[in-house]
Image (cartoon, rainbow, N blue to C red):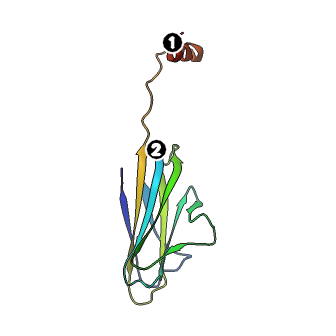
Amino acid sequence: MFPAFPVTSPKSTLRSAPTVVEAALPAGVVSWVGVQFPTGCGGLVHARILRAGHQVWPTNLDEDLSSDGFIVSWRERYPLLDPPYAFRLEVWNDDDTYQHKVTVFFEVEESRPGPAAPAGQSLLDRLRSLVGS
């Protein structure tokens, strides 16, 4: 799965009051993240990605992502196995003339639940059935 989340930030949007989009994803492992910055924004639009109230990317808490006409991307191994399966995308814009759209992409290796255990089967019985004894 490779969902994209566009975030348009109006001109003169403050870091303290960013444009916010919730990025709902399936359960799994995030294996790649990309943040596309528009050509011509001059590095004036900024983004960060949070989960459960904590900044995830960039990993330096006082930092943010910013560029001009470039996709900032990286390989990742971030488990997204507990609800909510979502990130909070925050974008702000120091440009006092134009709004800018940042697009955030995720590659998610979806997890699939294993087969349910028959009712009344103990953990020991389930382990025995897995190893064949």
Q: Given the current orientation, which residue lies at the most extreme bottom position?
A: 97
Q: Is residue 52 visible?
A: yes
* Frontmost residue, 109 versus 62: 109
Label 2: few (<14), some (14–19) or many (≥20) C-alpha neighbours in 10 Å: some
Q: How far across and down, in percent of the image, does residue 114 sit?
A: 45, 28
Q: Who's the residue at 56% across and 17% down the image?
A: 127
Q: Earlier in the sequence, mark 1 or mark 2?
A: 2
Asked if the residue at tag 2 contacts the one at tag 1, i.e. Cβ–Cβ closer than 8 Å, the answer is no
Label 1: few (<14), some (14–19) or many (≥20) C-alpha neighbours in 10 Å: few
Disc 2 target residue: 28
Q: Who's the residue at 47% across and 83% down the image?
A: 44
Q: Is residue 72 above or below residue 115?
A: below
Q: Amino acid at mark 2?
A: Gly
Q: Who's the residue at 38% across and 86% down the image?
A: 98
Q: Amino acid at mark 1?
A: Gly
Task: Check residue 132 in the rendering and tell me which mark sits there, or answer none.
Answer: 1
- From the viewer's perspective, is 122 left or right of 104? right
* Frontmost residue, 48 versus 133: 133
